Amino acid sequence: MGYMLEIKDLHKTFNIGTINEKVALDGVNLNLNPGDFVTIIGGNGAGKSTTLNAIAGVWPIDQGKIIVDGVDITRLSEHKRAVYLGRVFQDPMTGTASTMSIEENMAIAARRGERRGFRWSISRKEREFYKEQLRELDLGLEERLTTKVGLLSGGQRQAITLLMASLKKPKLLLLDEHTAALDPKTAAKVLEISDKIIQEHSLTAMMVTHNMKDAIAHGNRLIMMHEGKVIYDVAGEEKKKLHVSDLLAKFEEVSGGEFANDRMMLA
Amino acid sequence: MTMTMLMALDPMALVRSLPGNAAQGLIWGIMALGVYITFRILDFADLTVDGSLATGGAVAVMLIQGGMHPALSLIFAFLAGMAAGFVTGFLHTALGIPGILASILTQISLYSVNLGIMGKANQSMGIGQKGLVASARYVTSDNSYLFFIGLIVGCLVLVAIVYWLFGTELGASIRATGCNPQMASAQGINTNFCKVIALMISNGLVGLCGGVYAQYQGAADVNAGRGAIVIGLAAVIISEVIFGKLCAGKKIAFAYTLASVFVGAILYYIAYALVMWLGIDSDYMKLFSAVVVTCFLAAPYLKGKYLVRRRMAK
């Protein structure tokens, strides 16, 4: 069986030739098996979100290859590769259109990758389906289909964005610190929904997080990034046994200047 | 002295001018509908309209002079407007020029294009031209009510078409593009394509308005569109301030919102008539338009600031 995602030697430098030049990705290599749920941790500027944005095609990369389920998407524009990707962002405002209703947002997501023509944007049958889906979120949104999304709380918007990402099953789900802007209780609820959706649809997913506990508790695999590289990759039983203290120790190691040797050891 | 001035005003003159102003309001409402699409739905300040309005008028009048039926000429006025919108969209999306600047470039080049179409700055139709869709003559004719019914029905048909269009999948993706381009891209929507389509529809309506207005006036003028964007904005904003709350929450709220743009345009023209009636020099009317738009744009902002300050004081 082939990989669901292959990233080969990914490079990206921002603001080349200016005083703000920054190497964001410095040769990222990563392969994901179908059904992998990877959590990504690392310090500020480690390249976690940049990796996700590179996969999503927010800007062109400098060098490397991105292959999703055997299809090379490296040169596809952002809206073309959206066919393969479900995305949830850090800012709850980003994932939905605030002036449009819940059902309109969902109808747009349900047509991801399809031609959008002169058919009516939402059918009665769909509406019933969305209602059922919203009921499963258990946030009381099933009676508010025509409510403008802008009137909802951040947690509700993230839950809807998650639902939208799964309406058309993506090859890969990208969660970019999607609970960072929420209060702890709401964040837990949104994480619970994330787990449920990933399991139900057996999705391959990547989740960037700042919370090491969450990174250990969720998913079947964990990677740590530092200065634009993957420096630690652990899966299965070994990952389950991890403690926050282990990860902290790792962080100290890499920022303590023994990076080169450690990489050899970890490989 | 003020008294004698007020005494000299003839209320009947104002009343007599109202039907003509209502007709003009309805016609300019077509343009305002186009402005609504770019300004509110697409969130794009499109100044192309100052040029595409005159283009629509020039195309219609030249075709009518050439023997085409006035109603048919409007289709070409619409298409000419769409072409103008396409140019702005192309400059913005394919060449990466900021939206407002792209529209100014199109607008300024249209001035030459319009002169090219007409051959000179002003072209009129024969006084006895038959079959006009709209004409100032109709307003004062015996069965002017037929003209008004026809005009209102025509405007309502446009509202229905725009309502339908923005209810389709394509329309929904245009709305998403205007509201949140990042979300639209993530959902596989080609935002550049949507912007170009919306600009074309919008300027098509503006061109159509130009064609109808030229027939109403009996002539097309290269300066017909000067300041048109301000009138369009005035109509949109007046309608929002007055009808915004009334439209919200209704079943087909969006259709009401679109129709209220026409009412906004009529109200603008009535205010215009009132100011003219008061004896203000017509040279100052552009200033008047700008002041109206400024007031209606500033009002929500200042109100918000005032409310915040009052809440803080409590």
Image: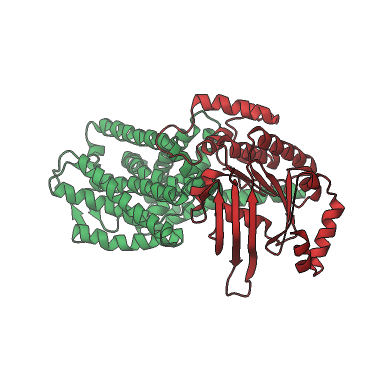
Q: In this view of the protein, which residue sits in the foreground, A160 or B117?
A: A160
In the picture as drawn, the residue positioned furthest to the front comes out as: A1
Percent position of residue B312, x then y: 75, 50
Percent position of residue B27, x then y: 33, 42
Q: Is residue B260 above or below residue A44?
A: above
Quarter of the image with the N terminus of chain A in it: top right
Quarter of the image with the C terminus of chain A in it: bottom right
The residue positioned 85% from the left and 54% from the top of the image is A246
Q: Which chain is red?
A: A
The residue positioned 57% from the left and 51% from the top of the image is A56
**Residue A264 falls left or right of residue B256:** right
Q: Is residue B17 above or below residue B256?
A: below
Q: In this view of the protein, which residue sits in the foreground, A259 or B18?
A: A259
Tint applied to chain B in the drawing: green
Q: In this view of the protein, which residue sits in the foreground, A140 or B188?
A: B188
**Residue A175 falls left or right of residue B68:** right
Q: In this view of the protein, which residue sits in the foreground, B256 or A63?
A: A63
The residue positioned 69% from the left and 42% from the top of the image is A154
The answer to whether residue B1 shows anywhere in this view is no
